[in-house]
Image (spheres, grey):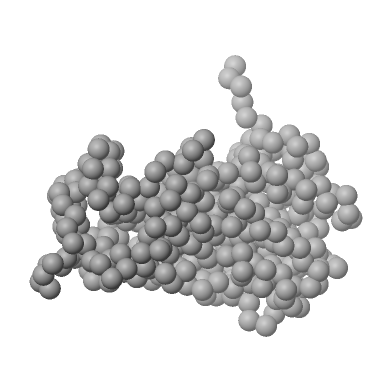
Amino acid sequence: MPEFEPIVGRYFKMNVAGDDYRIHVEEAGRGTPLVCLHTAGADTRQYRHLMCDPAITNHYRVIAFDLPWHGKSNPPVGWRDREYRLTTDLYVQTIMAFCRAMALERPVVMGCSMGGRVVLHLALKHAIDFRAVIALEGADRVEPYYELDWLHRPDVNGGEVCAAFVSGQVAPQSPDEHRWETLWMYMQSGPGIFKGDLYFYWYDGHFDDRSPKIDTARCPVYLLSGEYDSSCTPERTEATASRIKGSKATVMEGIGHFPMAENPALFRKYILPVLDEIRETVR
Amino acid sequence: MIDRIRDRVNANAGLVRRGQYVSLPFLLGIGEEDYVVTIEKGRVSSVEPRRLATATGRFTIRAAKAVWDEFWKPVPKRNHHDLWAMLAAGIAKIDGDLLPLMQNLQYFKDVLAAPRPPREG
């Protein structure tokens, strides 16, 4: 027999906002549920290193799912005639539907990039349902710096341009093996999906004056951002932390926008103390 | 560093292959100096200072000399490590016909970074 990784993947049907989706979920470990949300235009594979780390899986049941339209989750029937565009409401509804379907009791939720943004919305709207939220590369707002139309048009290869747009979001110190695996996932995304996700990340998902209303006494908030992140910069992370009273922010040196995927060995040094603290202090 | 672009690119067979459909000149602005970088089927055929007003390219990439000097270090500091990071930080500008740049973006990013010495370890 081959030496299997501990990750097990399965599929199930889930309805969100009137649409049925076939969802791909994978998990490893036992203990407190830890739901992991992938970045825009990507999928659950970004968390494969966490799921193979006994220091985490001895204490946490690590669960990641591909959002509808992403990875091995299907788009809805009739997708051909619809333009994919992720809104804050749809994103929050999707995560809540997933947690209900999986019967998870007050999981910790950790998301990266747009996943890091949406966990702040979860902390605001659904504090009681989550043990804690961890925003990787997640600020309450970012500044767009390119036109999204370049990401989906017939005269530019969508997969390659998406990967090339984000390649500079990987830190120069990150190992080539993980850099190019991270970018490979971007090359495999469905047409227009990264663009549709960025509608949430760059526009609809912004907080205006609401982030100070997050109550960290009810739902602890952790912010961890990479030094080399160009969108959720260290400055924006610290500004977000200053607006969310009681949140804890860390800038991860020598890491970019995809910490768990681009440099798993370095990332675990930052995330293990956070997961240990949640386990020891949050009931 | 600019003088290294041609040899470094042309010695990299994988990079030349990825750029096999690229044949055009583009302008690279380093501080006050513009250079015409001419690509033919992925190979850099010439890198020349812009002498004539009519010598131009399909698109232009410009940044201050200090920015490029940092960009070409083995491990550049943040905001200087990648063209798109430089755009996000507002320390580089691109102009002109961006279509061929977007169609071959990773290729052009790697051409720009070609003079960078390998990082140690």
In the drawing, does residue B83 fall left or right of residue A108? Answer: left
Residue depicted at x 84% and y 67%:
A218
Q: Looking at the picture, how far across and down is residue B74, in whole percent?
A: 44, 47
Q: Looking at the picture, how far across and down is residue A93, in whole percent?
A: 64, 66
Residue depicted at x 76% and y 54%:
A108
In the drawing, does residue B117 fall left or right of residue A207? Answer: left
Quadrant where the image shows the C terminus of chain A: bottom right
In the drawing, does residue B5 fall left or right of residue B119? Answer: left
Q: In the picture, residue A269 is in which quadrant?
A: top right
Instruction: Decide which of A55, A60 is in the foreground and name it.
Output: A55
Question: Is residue A279 positioned above or below A194 on the image?
Answer: above
Any part of residue A97 in sight: no
Q: Looking at the picture, how far across and down is residue A267, in whole percent?
A: 65, 46
Question: Is residue A3 positioned above or below A117 on the image?
Answer: above
In the drawing, does residue B65 fall left or right of residue A171? Answer: left
Residue depicted at x 63% and y 59%:
A225
Instruction: Decide which of B69, A54 is in the foreground and name it.
Output: B69
Any part of residue B34 in sight: yes
Instruction: Decide which of B11, B31 is in the foreground and name it.
Output: B31
Residue depicted at x 28% and y 71%:
B32
Q: Looking at the picture, how far across and down is residue A41, in whole percent?
A: 48, 56
Q: Count every numbered label the image shows and give the total.
A: 0
Residue farthest to the top? A1
Q: In the picture, residue B49 is in which quadrant?
A: bottom left
Quadrant where the image shows the N terminus of chain A: top right
